[in-house]
């Protein structure tokens, strides 16, 4: 995949006089979260990330970033089907990154889209940074840092042992705060003048600090390592690794680490995708010697994130969940057929986006985030139970909604259009571009029963070509009438 910015983005970043329409009230006021009541499912339908507090055994909660907001699952010692949740609508748009700092404050970023009047297009927009000191009950809100939030959305964030907050922002490089989000400054992994339009290594997608306090950053041009991040900005030393150093590809979307107690070595794993060179491939690149040598595994697999349990490594990807018990040499894939109580049947899970192993009093649960809900296993993946994390279309003011949204066909594979029928009916679903020209016919007179349903779209037109970045509209026609909404495509 070629990673590039369009001329219109250049105009946005460097010409701030462009006409921009953004939400008038993108932030919630400080106070108790909206909807902070006990529920039987998470807030959102797309599970981006799953984390827990830093102190082992401190509580039995998990924290989830979803396409619709934040969710806390508590009392995880309960049987899977009896887990309870509290949910927050943290800010405008969906969650884009989540992390926990040294004091167990939760940090989350959100993103939406803005309409650029001068360019007549929608573009992804960072809609804020949010911090909760009490596991999501209340939040403090900060504007998105950087020159402009347009194309400045946060893809990843991490917290250091000194109290610093680090964010990997697509069009704004690294954003760093040392005062709990009050102020931010822009950093890069080189000594060059800041210019993310021309310098691929300044477009950030992943950022991670290991247990041994080494800072790793993934960009559109490889991986960068800083062995002493606590140094002043001006003297901080970076080492860059690219495809020529042994990575599978230069587009690095996720970085994570684990200390192998048997080998007494720290392993760093990166999801490295093909970028511009035809010789690059998707896969995992990993090292146990700070990048002196790199190993490759799961060649051809598009990996989204990683998880760990003791010395076991888990990789979440386009084709499911993988596990390695020997630090990346050999991998086995889980077959996930999750029981859905709502559907009274099994749901086959193909794509996996996030993973967490939660061990409470020696009882382990595997939490897996997908595009259709949360799946959990408490017997090492032999059986799976689905927690339906979608919001019924009947709860939506528009009668239908799309998720994930914004949508990346490359990263997420497919989007889903949720809708509800009052009675059985034949359904038509068509996708249009911003000029209301038909792009794709998804269903034509297909029969659906009464109740909740979704229709999938892979982001391609009727000719099999991936649709260009921008806003699209879909219309679902049935015996109940027509319902419609919009979806944003962004690569």
Image: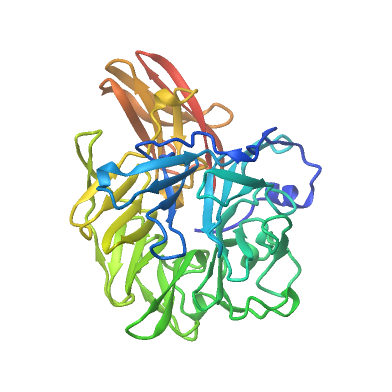
Colouring scheme, one of rainbow, by chain, secondary structure, one colour: rainbow
Is there any visible trace of residue 424 in the rendered image? yes
The residue lying toward the viewer, choosing from 265 and 18, is 265
Is there any visible trace of residue 126 in the rendered image? no
Is residue 68 shown left or right of residue 178? Answer: left
For residue 168, which quarter of the picture? bottom right
Q: Is residue 89 above or below residue 272?
A: above
State the residue at coordinates (42%, 44%). Answer: 46
Is residue 136 shown left or right of residue 17? Answer: left
The residue lying toward the viewer, choosing from 103 and 278, is 103
Q: Where is residue 410 in the image (x, y as percent from the top left)?
A: 45, 51
Q: In this view, does 130 lie above or below 196?
A: above
Q: Where is residue 323 in the image (x, y as percent from the top left)?
A: 29, 66
For residue 420, which quarter of the picture? top left
Q: In this view, does 44 lie above or below 330?
A: above
Q: Position of residue 446 (x, y in %)?
A: 28, 24
Query: How many marks overall?
Result: 0
Q: Is residue 326 above or below residue 401?
A: below
State the residue at coordinates (61%, 51%). Answer: 153
State the residue at coordinates (33%, 65%). Answer: 314
Is residue 131 shown left or right of residue 400? Answer: right
State the residue at coordinates (54%, 46%). Answer: 490
The residue lying toward the viewer, choosing from 371 and 228, is 228
The residue lying toward the viewer, choosing from 314 and 285, is 314
Q: Position of residue 41 (x, y in %)?
A: 36, 39
């Amino acid at each position: 995949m070629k990673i590039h910015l369009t001329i219109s983005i250049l105009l946005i970043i460097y010409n701030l006089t462009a006409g921009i329409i953004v939400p008038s009230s993108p932030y919630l006021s400080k106070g108790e979260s909206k909807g902070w009541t006990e529920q039987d499912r998470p807030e959102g339908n797309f599970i981006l990330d799953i984390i827990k507090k830093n102190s082992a055994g401190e509580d039995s909660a998990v924290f989830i970033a979803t396409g619709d907001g934040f969710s806390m699952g508590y009392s995880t010692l309960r049987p899977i089907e009896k887990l309870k949740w509290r949910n927050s609508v943290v800010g405008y748009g969906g969650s884009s990154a989540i992390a926990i700092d040294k004091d167990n404050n939760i940090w989350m970023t959100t993103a939406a889209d803005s309409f650029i009047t001068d360019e007549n297009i929608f573009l992804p927009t960072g809609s804020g940074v949010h911090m909760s000191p009490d596991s999501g009950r209340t939040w403090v809100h900060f504007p998105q840092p950087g020159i402009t939030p347009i194309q400045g959305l946060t893809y990843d964030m991490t917290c250091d042992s000194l109290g610093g907050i680090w964010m990997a922002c697509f069009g704004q490089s690294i954003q760093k705060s040392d005062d709990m989000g009050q102020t931010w400054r822009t950093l890069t992994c080189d000594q060059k003048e800041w210019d993310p339009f021309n310098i691929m290594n300044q477009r950030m997608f992943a950022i991670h600090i290991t247990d041994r306090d080494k800072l790793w950053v993934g960009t559109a041009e490889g991986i960068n390592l800083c062995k002493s991040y606590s140094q002043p900005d001006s003297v901080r030393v970076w080492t860059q690794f690219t495809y020529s150093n042994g990575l599978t590809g230069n587009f690095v979307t996720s970085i994570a680490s684990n200390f192998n107690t048997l080998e007494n070595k720290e392993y760093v794993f990166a999801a490295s995708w093909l970028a511009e060179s035809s010789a690059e491939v998707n896969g995992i690149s990993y090292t146990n010697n700070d990048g002196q040598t790199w190993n490759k595994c799961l060649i051809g697999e598009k990996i989204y994130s990683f998880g760990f349990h003791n010395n076991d490594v888990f990789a979440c990807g386009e084709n499911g969940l993988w596990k390695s018990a020997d630090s990346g040499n050999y991998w086995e894939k889980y077959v996930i057929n999750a029981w859905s109580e709502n559907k009274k049947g099994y749901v086959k899970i193909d794509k996996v986006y996030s993973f967490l192993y939660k061990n409470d009093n020696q009882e382990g649960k595997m939490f897996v985030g997908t595009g259709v809900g949360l799946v959990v296993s408490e017997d090492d993946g032999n059986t799976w139970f689905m927690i339906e994390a979608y919001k019924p279309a009947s709860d939506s003011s528009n009668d239908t909604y799309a998720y994930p949204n914004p949508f990346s066909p490359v990263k997420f594979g497919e989007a889903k259009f949720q809708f509800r029928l009052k009675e059985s009916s034949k359904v038509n679903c068509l996708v249009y571009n911003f000029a209301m020209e038909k792009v794709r016919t998804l269903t034509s007179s297909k029969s659906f029963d009464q109740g909740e349903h979704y229709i999938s779209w892979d982001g391609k037109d009727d000719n099999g070509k991936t649709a260009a970045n921008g806003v699209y509209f879909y219309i679902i026609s049935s015996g109940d009438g027509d319902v419609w909404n919009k979806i944003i495509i962004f690569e």
